[in-house]
Amino acid sequence: MLYPQENEIRELKDLSGIWNFKVDWKDEGLEKEWYARRLENPLFMPVPSSYNEITVDNAVRDHIGTVYYEREFYIPESWKDMRLVIRVGSAAHRAVVYLNGAKITEHKGGFLPFEAEITGMTGRKNRLTISTDNTLDWTMLPPGETRRYDDPVYPEGFRTQEYHFDFFNYGGIHRPVKILGLPRTFIRDIRVTTSLKSSLGIIHYEVEYDGDPADVKMILCDAGGKVLAESTGASGELPVPKPVLWEPGKPYLYHVKAVLSRKGTDIDSYSLPVGIRTVRVTETEFLINDKPFYFKGFGKHEDMDIKGKGMDQALNLRDFNLIKWIGANSFRTSHYPYSEEIMNLADRLGIVIIDEVPAVGFNMFNKNEIIFKKGRVDEKTLQTHLETLRELIARDKNHPSVVMWSCANEAATHEEAAGPYFKAISEEARKLDATRPITIVQSSYFDECKAAQYFDVVCLNRYNAWYTDSGRLEVIGPMLEKELKGWHERFKQPVLLSEYGADTIAGFHREPAVMFTEEFQVEYLKMHHDVLDRLDFIIGEHIWNFADFATRQGVRRIDGNKKGLFTRQRQPKMAAHFVRERWKNKPDFRK
Ligand code: BDP
C-alpha cells in the first residue's frame, strides 16, 4: 500500500483538525443510527489524537467501547474526473466509516492504514462519520478480554478490559485521515528490492496499476534529482554502477519515479525513495551491506502526554533528535507498527528499524495457565495475525530502514501449541518477503522454547534483578551470560538483547543505589553491558525503554512505566548521559 502523495497529477487533502465527537456510553449508536444524521450535542476532538486524555473526564479516559467522530468536508468540482479515495492512517482498534450516512468500509486492527473508494462525491458538502471501538477480544491483535459485571454492587454498565500487555489501551483516530484524488487509471502499488553484485547495485521493481491498459516507465534519479537510468515495463531492473549505499547514519536515498502513460501523455506518477542496501544474518552476525552491524537503541512506544498515541511530527522529530544525541542507531517498533511518518523519517535519518506486528499479550505469565488454546490464542487469532503481517509488509516493504520483521513479543513459546503456530507465521513472513530476516522477541527460557528454530535471530527480553531477585544487581552477570549462551548454542543464531531496564523516577537519588533511583538504573544497565561486551554472537542492545510511557493503572505501575532513559516529556535521566558515553564510543559496525 502506497503512502499518500501529491504531485503533478495526484491530489491530496488532509482532514486533520477538530472533529465532532460523541461517546457511545450505552452501546446504542448503531441501533439508533448515529451515523445517519449529525451527532447531537457532540464534544470537540482533535484528529489525529487518542481521545482519552483530551477531556478532564475520567469516564472518557477509561471508556471501553465505541465512540463516534464526525466532520464535514468538500471535494472540489475540479476533482470530478478523479478516482477518490478516503484513507485512514490508523484507528484503534476497530473502525467503521460512513459517508453521508452510508457505510463505506470497516477495518479491524488499530495500527495499520485502510481505505475506501468514494469517487463521485465532488461539489457537495459531505458528512464523514467514523466510529472506533477500543474493545479487545481474542481474535484481535493485540488480544484482550472485556468483562461485564452483573453484580449490583458494581455501578450499571461497569466493565473492565483484561489484557496482558503493558501499555495504555488508547483509542480513537490516531493517524491522519486523508482524501486522495487519483487518475482513473492509477498506480496501485510499487515494490522495490535492491541487490549488490560487487560494485554494481541493482534496483528490482514491480509496478501494479488498475484501470485501462497503459505504458509503464520507471525513472531512477540520484538524491539531487539527476536522472541516472530509465526502464520500461511493469517490472524490471535498474542498474546503478558504484552505488552510494544506504547505511545507518549515512542514509543515501535514490528516487524511482513510476510513470503511467498513454500515447505519450502521462496519466499517473508516483515517486518513491530507495535505499540500496543488503541485509543478511550468519550464526553470529547481522550484516548490513555485508558489514557486521551492532544494534544500539531501544524499544519505544508511540506515547505522549495528552495526545496518547496520536501522530505528532514535533514529537517524532524530537525523538529522532534524541536518538541521534544519545548515539543510538536503531529501535524496535515495540509493540505494533508505528506511523508511516515515523518510518519515512527513519529512512531519511538513517535509523535502523525492527518492525513489529501487534502480537503482544500472548502470555499469561503463569505456567499453570495455557494461552495457546481454543478461545484464547487459537486459529482465529492466527488468521488475524497472518492478515496483520500481510498488511504490515504491504505497507512497509520498501523502507530501507526496516531490516527485520518482528512477528511477536514475549509469546508463551514454552507451550506446545506455540510451535505450529509460529511455524505458520514464519512461513507466511518468508513468503511475503524473502529479503529480510525474521524474529520473534522472547521471554521464555532457551531450553523450553518451541518456536525460535523457525526464525533467524534470537531477540531476548530479560529483567533479572528487577522482577526476579529484585534489587540484587550481582545476579545479572552470571544469569544473563548463561542464558545468552544457551540461546545461541541451542539455536545457532545471533542474539540481540531486545529489552532490559529498570523503572526509574527522575530525581530519585540514593547511594548506594536502590531500585527506582537514577543511580540504580545506571548500575543496572552497566551490569548488562559488561556481559554483552564479552560475547561475540551478540548483535546489539535495545534498552527498555526510550521514554517513560502510560500504562493502565495497577499496583505495579506508578503513573506508568518509568523504564525510560528519557522522561515522558523527553528530557534525559542520569542514565541517558551514561549510555551516551558508551554509545558514542561504540561504532555502528563491529570490526
Ligand atoms: C516486557 C514487555 C514490555 C514491558 C516490560 C516491562 O515486553 O512491554 O513494558 O516488560 O515490564 O515484558 O517494563
Image (cartoon, grey):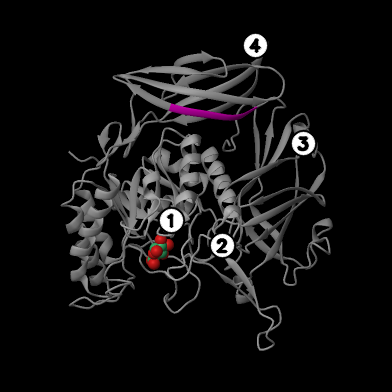
Q: Quadrant of residue 235?
A: top right
Mark 4 C-beta to ligand 1 under 8 Å: no
Look at label 4 and name its amino acid.
Gly
**Mark 4 and mark 2: Cα distance apart in space:** 57 Å
Query: SS for tag 3?
Result: loop
Mark 4 and mark 2 residues within 8 Å of each other at the beta carbon:
no
Callout 1, which amino acid?
Answer: Asn
Q: Secondary structure under badge 4?
A: loop
C-alpha span from label 3 to label 4: 26 Å
Q: Amino acid at mark 2?
A: Arg
Is the CB of the residue bearing disc 1 within 8 angstroms of ligand 1? yes
Which region shows up in magenta? 187-193
Circle number at residue 119: 3
Residue 75, how many percent across, how many down?
A: 75, 40
Whichever of labels 1 and 2 marks the residue nearer the N terminus, that label is 2
Q: Position of residue 95 (x, y in %)?
A: 68, 54
What secondary structure is found at the residue carrying circle 1?
strand
Label 2, label 3: how far apart the Cα atoms are: 41 Å
Q: Is residue 57 visible?
A: no
Is residue 234 among the parts visible in the rendering?
A: yes
Extreme residue in the bottom direction: 153
The answer to which image quadrant residue 472 occupies is bottom left
